[in-house]
Amino acid sequence: MTYVLAADIGGTKTDLAIFDTDQGLGRPLFPATLINQNYESFSFMLASFLEKVSMKPEYACFGVAGPVLSNRVKLTNLPWEINASDIYSQFPLKKVDIINDLVALANAVPYMSDADIIVIYPATYRKKGTVGLVAPGTGLGIAFCVWGGENYIVCPSEGGHAGFSPADADELELLRYLFSEGINTSFESLCSGSGLPNIYRFLLYSGRFVETEWVREEMSTRADPTPVIIKAALDEIKQCPVCREAMRLFTVILAEICGNLAVTVLTTGGLYIGGGIPPRILPLLNSKEFIRRYTRKGKMSDLVRSIPVSVIINPKAALTGAAAYGLRAHDNK
């Protein structure tokens, strides 16, 4: 019996579990979610986790939020560096694979059931067509999968750092605001957990909105304003116009990103939206405004209208994808 250790390492938290190669992706063993800021490094976190489990994994695959080069990564939104050779020296593992977190999420797509997603724009999936993924979480991840003859090959990218392209006068002013504040003018600077506060501050800066007192008070007690903005935008009782407008802009910018990916790599196999934020804002994504912006691609509008969009609602999907990658590594040893 052989065990595979899998991890999904985000900017804020890390999901870990052990999988039995005989059971495949069935029931994960010892699943845990740990808060990153409580650990000096990933090695400390890993040591703490493994001390509490009874089995000894031989293979490991870690999905990480950052660009992976030569089996090592410096996380984009966390002061950690993870190197497979360092993991080898500290833990008795035969093989360690470090992959981008969107690569992990993409590896989970073939194993997803109807319970793992919500279709917000139904259309026809083309068998063996390219699959696209956009995931706004702490940062903004983008990846795609192409058919390789027997299975899908995952292509990582850092497309979230591509330049933001405004589509109307309000968004042009938003771009100018980023310039004036010395903020990188990327999509991630707006469409992510770290970017949403930039939209919020822009709206206050514009003079068109006044900060809601109860929101300001709640933000003063929180290190991260993003959950406060999202909660206030969706609150039907306590009104916050600036938060609602911030989330509206966030949503249409996300739709723009999805449409861009659809035409860039021809995602006829479907487009999936993952990450931590989308499941929390489903009423905004399941809207006519989102679909209008997604399909507004000029001469390519008809093409984009033929491409379905789904939101991944399984919070452990990337962990499953990392495990799938690790299990394949074991099978191909």
Image: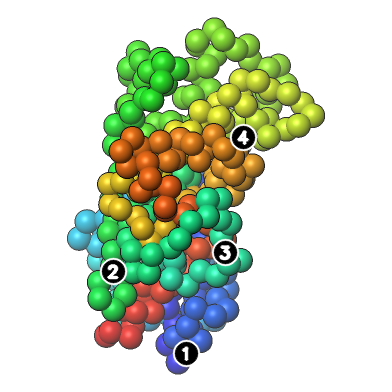
- Alpha carbon distance from label 2 to label 3: 22 Å
On the image, numbered disc 3 is attached to which residue?
116
Kind of residue at disc 4: Ile
Q: Quadrant where the N terminus lies?
A: bottom left
Kind of residue at disc 1: Asp
On the image, numbered disc 1 is attached to which residue?
22
On the image, numbered disc 4 is attached to which residue?
230
Question: Where residue 242 appears, x then y in whole percent?
Answer: 61, 20
On the rendered structure, is 29 left or right of 44? right
Counting residues from the N terminus, which is met first, the one under dot 2 or under dot 3? 3
In this view, 326 is above or below 286 = below
Q: Quadrant of residue 207?
A: top right
On the image, numbered disc 2 is attached to which residue?
147
Kind of residue at disc 2: Trp
Q: Secondary structure at mark 3?
A: helix
Question: Where residue 13 appears, x then y in whole percent?
Answer: 51, 52
Most distant residue in the top direction: 207
Q: Secondary structure at mark 1?
A: loop
Residue 63 seen in render: no
> Which mark lies nearer to you, 4 or 2?
2
> Which mark lies nearer to you, 1 or 2?
2
> Which mark lies nearer to you, 2 or 3?
2
